[in-house]
Amino acid sequence: MNAWLRVAALRFCLVLASLLCAQAAYSQTASDAAVKYFNKLKSKDYEAAAAMFFPPALAEFRKKMGFMSEIPDDEREGIYATFFGPDADKDTVAKLSDAQFFAAFLGSVIDQAEAQAQTEPQLRDVQVLGEVAEGPKVRHVVTRSKMKAGELEVESMEVVSFTNNNGVWQATLSGQMKGLPQQLRAALGR
């Protein structure tokens, strides 16, 4: 994997850890959902984490990743294996739900970042500092997170947005996450 992809993979992990907060069943506030989400992320339960997203956000992410179908067949299998796991191919990826697609992508990218760092990135501490309402259905949660990968330690503060979907707080994709498929497309020369 070239240096740009290594940096992008680690950055993705860090962005994800700090930006992707989500709902869990029976969460009373978006802040409660954020705490529950980070617990899922710490335990590497990527399917449960993906299930915590607002479904239209996952559909949007998958649609933006649709450029992968434009990659020639002889290159596509390697790309699928890189971003969806060693057994992934065109047919298995096509059969995934939007949440499974996102979870497989997330897990593979984090696994690659761990392999590149030659150590497992550790989400050490996440603090929810507060939340701001934007109307009755949107909340923005302010978090501070600390992550360590080898000798690299990163602390970041982020604002993570949630939508109340039938009484359940669900994460929406941040601007950085929405832009990730475009960055990946450019890195792959597509």
Image (cartoon, rainbow, N blue to C red):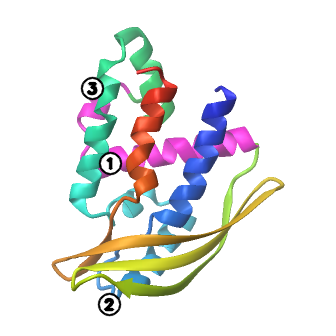
Q: Amino acid at mark 3?
A: Asp
Residue labelled with disc 1: 100
Residue labelled with disc 2: 28
Quadrant (top left, top right, bottom left, bottom right) of the C terminus: top left
Q: What x and y, as percent, mark residue 131?
A: 43, 85
Viewer can see residue 85: no
Label 3 SS: helix
Disc marking residue 91: 3
Quadrant (top left, top right, bottom left, bottom right) of the N terminus: top right
The secondary structure making up most of the magenta span is helix
Contact, CB < 8 Å: mark 2 with mark 3?
no
Q: What x and y, as percent, mark residue 47?
A: 38, 56
Contact, CB < 8 Å: mark 3 with mark 1?
no
Q: Which residues are magenta?
A: 89-117
**At x 36% / y 11%, what residue is drawn?**
72
Compared to 54, does 120 lie above or below? above
**At x 23% / y 49%, what residue is drawn?**
59
